[in-house]
Amino acid sequence: HTRWATHGDVTEANAHPHTSSDGKISLVHNGVIENYTGMKEFLIEKGYTFQSETDSEALCNLIAYHYKKEPKDGPKNPFLEAVRKSLRHVEGTYGIAVICPDFPDELIGARKGSPLIIGIGKGENLLASDVNAITHCTQNVVYLNDNEVVHLQNNDFSITTVSSKNVEAVIHKVDWDTSEAELGDYDHFMQKEI
């Protein structure tokens, strides 16, 4: 994942993905979390440490904080609940993809102001910020709307709002020839464009 460095310099420590200080949550993020300094101060008081200067790491640790508090034997998925609870505190924009080692076959994505697309494949589901990144795998996509959260598994996915309301997915067929994005006989894409 690449993004512009909004907070902090362009350094290895500020590069994505970020992992929470307890190692339970990793994420990539596109957008700007405007209230990250308050979030970071709160988390430092709770014992969380930071390796970067980014707003993204603050969100990562906030999800870890909520995950730690979630009951692990309850009827709800604690990973999904932690992401939704954390996003209710975010001011700003985000397109995120989040993983947790306790749920190795699951991926959670969410968006507000930054694009996020679900690719529906055979035996796999994908997440990307641009449809061009997944058309080589599938042409069936769902465009997430603002304040929506997707819970992806290999053969299944569900969409809810940040406030836990179910959302019906609308699958679109992308009519796009993937060969248009391939290099072909050219040495580089500039040559192809000329």
Image: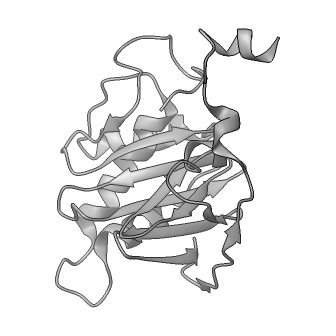
Q: Which residue appears at 26% of the width and 56% of the height?
A: 100
Residue at figure coordinates x 68%, y 49% from the top left: 115
Task: Give coordinates of residue 38: x percent, y percent.
Answer: 51, 40
- The quarter of the picture where the C terminus appears is top right
Give the side of residue 65 with respect to residue 188, left or right.
left
Q: Is residue 106 visible?
A: yes
Q: Which of 162 and 101 is in front in this view?
A: 101
Residue placed at 35% from the left, 35% from the top?
A: 18
Percent of width and height locating residue 90: 58, 52
Can you name the residue that lies furthest to the right here?
194
Question: Which of the two residues, 20 or 117, is positioned nearer the viewer here?
Answer: 117
- Residue 35, position as x, y percentages in the image: 60, 41
Which quadrant of the structure image shows residue 26?
Answer: top left
Q: Where is residue 94 in the image (x, y as percent from the top left)?
A: 61, 47
Horizontal side, residue 142 vs residue 176: left or right: left
Q: Which residue reaches farthest front?
A: 185
Residue 178 figure quarter: top right
Is 31 above or below relative to 105? above
Q: Give 39 or 22, whichever is nearer the viewer.
A: 22
The reply to whether residue 130 is in sight is no
